[in-house]
Amino acid sequence: MCLWACRKVAVDQTITPVVVVVDKEGFSTFKIEAKNNTGKITADVNCTITGDTITAVVPEMTQNNKWIVSFETKKAATTIKANDTLATSGVTVTDFSKPVTYTISLSSGETKKYIVKVRVFTGLPVLYLTTSGPVTSKEIYVKGKLDIDPNVTDEQAVNHITLQMKGRGNSTWVNFPKKPYRLKFDSKASLLGMPTAKNWVLLANYDDKTLMRTKIAFEYARRIKSDFAPQSRFVEVVLNGEFLGNYLLTSQVEVNENRINITELKAGAKDITGGYVVEVDSKLDETYWFRTSLKSMPMTIKEPSEITAPQLAYIKDYMNNTEAALYAADWKDAVNGYAKYIDAESFMRWYMINETVKNQDSWDFSSIFYYKDINGKLKMGPVWDFDLSGGNCNYSPSQYPTAWYSRYGLWMLRLAQDPAWNFKWRAKWVEERPKATAQIFADIDYYGNYLKLSAAQNFKRWPILDQYVWPNVVWLGTYDKEVQYFKSFMTQRIAWMDANINGY
């Protein structure tokens, strides 16, 4: 109900003023001038006007996203507001830490609205990490805090998070100057629109000069619904005041309602048939590990981290029984063969991703994860570790876009010998090829453009574009050439798979 001229007006009779969007009325120029932002920028930043959206990237790293903007309109305006504040060109300071709505009002009563987004540095979110001491170990956490600048990309409810931080990785930690890290929050929190959790990973991608191979594979995995395929975000990282470059922020492989969503296995649980995450890992660097009885596959226990003797015995027996069933005389039997122990569809989705990008580490070496829930069959996921995919490994056949590769892992090779498996695999390729697989090329184009500014800063910090970094196949001198090489490899790879899928 509202009151007007002492008369009562019913709610459904209330007149809402009509906002007329005028196509030919609006801003003709919109920029951030150095003369009005002394000490913050040294050159003018011209903003891009596209329809009713205005965007800009200010090439300075700053946590202060307040700017004085200068603008001109196509027609004289009675008022211009930034959100609800009157704005004067070259005078008004506006906070652009979130998108700002500019409204132009004309004497005719017409209005024009714009959404203005001003990002800083490279346009990516920036993670400012501060620790109580240097992070020099993969074993010892260092206390610290995280300040998050989402940079007008994702909603971030909590911008200041206390945490612990340590190194991670194997060859990437030991051999490369740009280090990967593990973050452990004191309390669960959402990060850049990703679901809440305590544990996060910063992948450095030092030996992947496109910076995107893992991201491309993760997105492909999510499209074909591979089990628990990780979400991820590209970010800039500043550690104790030092800019470290472009990183891929993603989830830790763990049992969690937002990660591997299976029953968490407690020490005193009566039902010990599920809650396990097992990794094929030749390094055997977990506390609990074993080798399978028949093929000596190296298996490490990721979850539960503190496994009891009965639980360890159960999962060890299950993996041995699975392998025994794969190589038994009746291994293709739908009741008593391998189908009794594994979820074939889950294995197939994992295989499809790794074979498509020809991932070096998909062949019984490391980062191959299996999980088993209560009373469930063995499944594969999440997919992981793709820096040596897409033609980026010079010491194995994975460097060539032709020939099957992931197929020759021990268990996968056995599955490939089953005609029923082959039939389903070919059908899966035919189903996913037109959209999910074809989208890989659009993704490479998109991220190649999206990361241009970030790549420039990353390779300014780490000037390696014209240098061999283990185990690069090529080193081409520019970021664009690296991206084009990756795209060319994937074009040849997928064309080869198309031509040879019926001979699998």
Image (cartoon, helix red, strand yellow):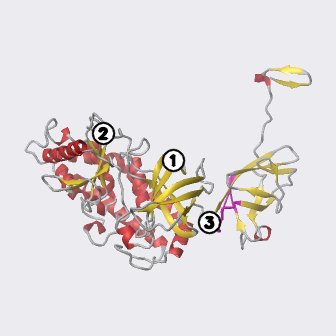
Asked if the residues shown at circle 3 and circle 2 are in contact, with their CB atoms under 8 angstroms apart, the answer is no
| Residue carrying label 3 | 121
Say which amino acid is labelled 3: Phe
Question: For the magenta stretch, what is the residue range?
Answer: 47-65
Asked if the residues shown at circle 1 and circle 3 are in contact, with their CB atoms under 8 angstroms apart, the answer is no
Q: Secondary structure at mark 2?
A: loop
Between residue 370 and residue 163, name the one nearer to us: 163
| Residue carrying label 2 | 373
Give the residue drawn at x 55%, y 69%.
243
In this rendering, position of residue 69 left or right of residue 127: right
Say which amino acid is labelled 2: Asp
- Decide if residue 504 is in sight here: no
Give the residue drawn at x 34%, y 68%.
171
| Residue carrying label 1 | 187
- Asked where in the image residue 499 lies, by quadrant, the reply is bottom left
Q: Secondary structure at mark 1?
A: strand
